[in-house]
Image: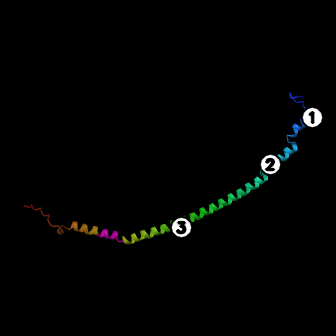
Amino acid sequence: MTDGQQTLTRDVLREELARYPTREELREELGTELARYPTREELREELGQFVQLLIREQEKAEQRHQELMRQLARATTATAEEHRREVGVLDDRYRDLPGRVVALERGLREHVEDAAAHGRPRRPTRKR
């Protein structure tokens, strides 16, 4: 066997093959490369920790939500009580209004019905 210029001998072939890694060298290199990546068990453990962290954060968020709802309920109750107090002041101020209106209407009706209380209408006078 020749490549056109040099005869291929066993020594040349050995030298050429020596430049390529052996199976053992490839396995060792592959093992070194794969060692950088986590195993399934390591991934499962990390995922489990992440899920636990996520559950704790969700529980915290639910507690914050419940606390906000309690604060909102307290604020709403306080606002409703303040509103009732303000409306109560108005109610107290105008509590006697219906009676006063009835009295005014009765007085007006009596006045309208009493013809003697009304004089004859005057005619307008001309100005000269």
Q: Earlier in the sequence, mark 1 or mark 2?
A: 1
- Other-residue count near label 1 (Cα within 10 Å), few / some / many at <14 / 14–19 / ≥20: few
Of residues 40 and 74, the one nearer the viewer is: 40
Residue at x 25% of width, y 67% of height:
108
Question: In this rendering, would 58 be left or right of 79?
Answer: right
Using the image, tell me which numbered label, if any, was put on residue 10.
1
Residue 87, position as x, y percentages in the image: 42, 68
**Label 1 sits on what residue type?**
Arg
Of residues 125 and 49, the one nearer the viewer is: 49
Residue at x 61% of width, y 63% of height:
64
* 1 or 2: mark nearer the eye: 1
Q: Residue furthest top?
A: 4
* Residue located beneath label 2 in the image: 34
Confirm or deny contact between disc 1 and disc 3 (CB under 8 A). Answer: no
Q: Earlier in the sequence, mark 1 or mark 3?
A: 1
Magenta stretch? 95-103
Q: Residue furthest front?
A: 5
- Other-residue count near label 2 (Cα within 10 Å), few / some / many at <14 / 14–19 / ≥20: few
Disc 3 on helix, strand or loop?
A: helix
Residue 111 is one of the magenta-drawn residues: no
Question: In this rendering, would 31 be left or right of 110?
Answer: right
* Residue located beneath label 3 in the image: 74
Quadrant where the N terminus sits is top right
**Label 3 sits on what residue type?**
Arg
Residue at x 51% of width, y 67% of height:
77
